[in-house]
Amino acid sequence: MIELNNITKKFDKKVAVQNLDLNIEKGRITMLIGPSGCGKTTTLKMINRLIDSTEGDITIEGRSIYEMDAVDLRRSIGYVIQEIGLFPHMDVFDNIAVVPRLLKWNEKKVRARVEELLDLVTLNSSYAHKYPLQLSGGESQRVGLARALAADPEILLMDEPFGAIDPINRARLHESFISIQEKIEKTIVFVTHDINEAIKLGDKIAIMRSGKLIQYDNVTNILYEPENEFVEQLLGHDRNIKALVLKKNRDYIVQSGFVKVLKSDNPSSIIKAIEGDSRRRAMVVDKDGTFEGLFILEKTRQDAKPRLIFIDDPICVEKNNNLQETFSLMIEAGESSLPVVDTRKKFLGVINLEDIFNEFKEQDR
Amino acid sequence: MIWQYMVEHQQRIMTLVLQHFMLFAVSMAFTLLFGMVISIYAGREKALQVGETILSITAAAQAVPSVAVVALVFLFIGIGATPAIVALVIYSLVPIVFNATSGLLSVDSKIIEAARGTGYTDRQILWKIKIPIATPVIMAGIRSAATINIGTATVAAVIGGGGLGDLIFTGIKLNRDHIIIIGAVLTSLIAIIIDTLFFYLEKRVTPRGLQVKR
């Protein structure tokens, strides 16, 4: 889709990007990552000609961008930067409508498109007439994304778009970004310095250092076959844990090693079942398969009879979430096994910590 | 006594007020024109040194007293309404150029980059992004230029510019306090009215998005 052929960029004498070859695939998210000054942002800005390369050519679907008018090129490519990039004197509607209006769409079409986009980025239509100063960081970023998508460009360039957002909201934006991309399937080039973000969002990762491309591959290969020490360092010692982001809970569900009871079962039989369970608990699932909670036993004194306790909102995980979150939850809660449900709370089985550990071992091999 | 003088010299006072206002209006019109052209030129992000030089010149020029400017213009051009207007234009240019240039230069470079990356042409960036965002600062400069202009116009009377300064200087020559007071009070009144008008204009033209509360 986008091909960078032997690109070199010099600022005066300083080489920012050196002999870079990069083939960016259509419909995928390509992450550009590296330490500051590695040339990732320069590379991104060369794609929409905010910066012109010193040598080499960039083609989009076979056509050199240097044969196109720079302004037309930019209007055909979505561009997202940190939240500060919204125009403060325009309301949300006008911000999103920028490119359609530059392209002289009629107002009716613009209106319909803005509404569609607000919906896509899950902002209520009442936001249309708010101003950037009145938005939170996360909301601004959604508007920024909507603005970039306004004229339905094939390509989206994103320059650390979530950099200024706090971790909790960033995780939320990541989720909605992933689900938006599933719908729109744009070719996205995304600059970040956060390796976790790169692993979580990227289909492919291009690692850069001092203007050179060090490794360019899909996320799994980068994690399991780092090219050199530099990449290993970038991934960190916990790359095994990071790799868990790529795994889904649904692939690690086991159906054995736990007991399942109905809430209405005879208490003494439940107690008996729990006493026979290695983790001393029983999953409570109703006749339709819906997960209701857990029974555990509580012994107050050595000789006293154990008492049955029902927990109606135990920690459980959803089958489509990633294994890293499940792992963190287990560590946090001190549980070595968690029940798994689907979005409708249907009980599917459990995930065990030892299976996650086995995953680590497999990765080390 | 004041009242009596005003009634007796009604005609003359009215003429002087009108003259004063004309000095203000004509010189402000030229100042706005020149000021904006200079500031747009100086406020380009591509030529930062030009902007910074102009900023330091205007910052220093703000310390020059108005009488000095009037005197210099008299030396080079002579007397009459035209030199008076020239002096006023030069003197009021300073706050306008200073504010407008610094306003244009202080527009966040990230916003300009976002605009360029979105597909605005350089001209569109100027008119649709930079000028609207710099409006509060530009307008503050225009407003202070306007009040300074009204005040300086009295000094212009020294070189035959006419206006309410005539009244004040007549009062001084004849040693008549009430004439001085009439001239001074009328000048101040006009200055206050103009300042208030520009205050509302400033509110009016500043984009709403820059005025909202978080």
Image (cartoon, rainbow, N blue to C red):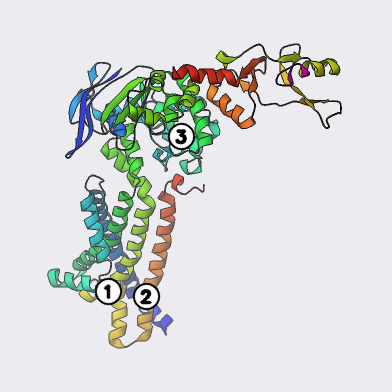
Give the amino acid type for the residue marked by disc 2 in the picture.
Answer: Gln
B164 or A172: nearer the viewer: A172
Residue A182 is left or right of residue A279, and the answer is: left
Query: Is label 3 in a helix, a strand or a loop?
Result: helix
Give the amino acid type for the residue marked by disc 1 in the picture.
Answer: Val
| Residue B16 versus residue A92 in the image, above or below | below
- Say whether residue A342 is visible: no
Residue A177 is left or right of residue B112, and the answer is: right
Residue A244 drawn at (x, y percent)? 50, 22
Mark 1 crowd level (few <14, some 14–19, many ≥20, 10 Å Cα): many
Res A141 label: 3
Residue A66 drawn at (x, y percent)? 20, 25
N-term-proximal mark, 1 vs 2 = 2
| Quadrant occupied by the N terminus of chain A | top left
Query: Is label 1 in a helix, a strand or a loop?
Result: helix
From mark 1 to mark 2, how far is it between C-alphas?
22 Å
A332 or A167: nearer the viewer: A332
- Say whether residue B107 is visible: yes
Q: Are marks 2 and 3 on the same chain?
A: no
Q: Quadrant of residue B20?
A: bottom left
> Which residue position holds label 1?
B155
The residue stretch that appears in magenta: A275-283
